[in-house]
Amino acid sequence: MPVVATEDRGAVRHVILQRPEKRNAMNGELVLALGAALEEAAGDDAVRCVVVRGEGAMFSSGMDLGDLRTLSENPSQLRRFRRPILNTWNLLEEMPKSTICQIHGACLGGAFELALAADFLLLP
């Protein structure tokens, strides 16, 4: 199963975080897949609005602790670790289309940073 899925509902593209077994924790694979999905949505003229949401019990528990543990063992990799994250969050923030983070359950740490990059937050 892919870690990020997309679903079009008319002119609205839903980008869905799909690691529910890990509470949608953001590892390197998910960050890159999210960035690719946002780039694709930004370049698609049929898409007028992008909604980012999580599958399962919560939006996202933030950064994957396994990735953070690996980073703590080699802190010289911090810039390399952060670059794709910053690129993805900036893409959401700077996208000329309306962006929404649909939050349910928890939205922690880096997930909250992602949510703040959207134009609107949709809470239950």
Image (cartoon, rainbow, N blue to C red):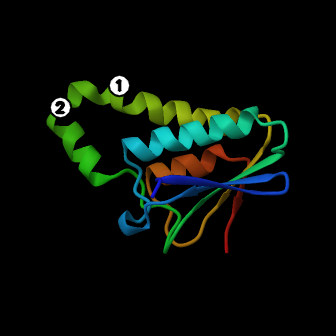
Q: Relative to 90, is 28 above or below?
A: below
Label tally: 2
Give residue 123's quadrant in the image.
bottom right
Which residue is farthest front? 1
Badge 2 marks a residue whose secondary structure is loop
> Which image quarter is the C terminus in?
bottom right
Q: Residue at x 47, y 38 (%)?
A: 32
Distance of label 1 from label 2 (alpha carbons): 11 Å
The label shown at residue 110 is none
Residue 31 located left or right of residue 119: left
Residue 60 located left or right of residue 102: left
Which percent across, then down, holds residue 73? 14, 37
Q: Mark 2 = which residue?
A: 74
The label shown at residue 79 is 1
Give residue 48's quadrant in the image.
top right
Task: Looking at the picture, tell me which residue is in the foreground, 24 or 74.
Answer: 24
Residue 107 located left or right of residue 51: left
Give residue 41's quadrant in the image.
top right
Badge 1 marks a residue whose secondary structure is helix
> Which image quarter is the N terminus in?
bottom left
Which percent across, then down, holds residue 62? 42, 55
Q: Amino acid at mark 2?
A: Asn
Q: Label 2 crowding class (10 Å Cα cut-off): few <14, some 14-19, many 20+?
A: few
Q: Relative to 21, is 111 above or below?
A: above
Which percent across, then down, holds residue 6? 64, 53
Q: Residue at x 21, y 46 (%)?
A: 69
Q: Residue at x 25, y 51 (%)?
A: 66
Q: Amino acid at mark 1?
A: Arg
Residue 63 located left or right of residue 92: left
Q: Label 1 crowding class (10 Å Cα cut-off): few <14, some 14-19, many 20+?
A: few
Task: Answer with mark 1 or mark 2, whichever residue precedes in sequence.
Answer: 2
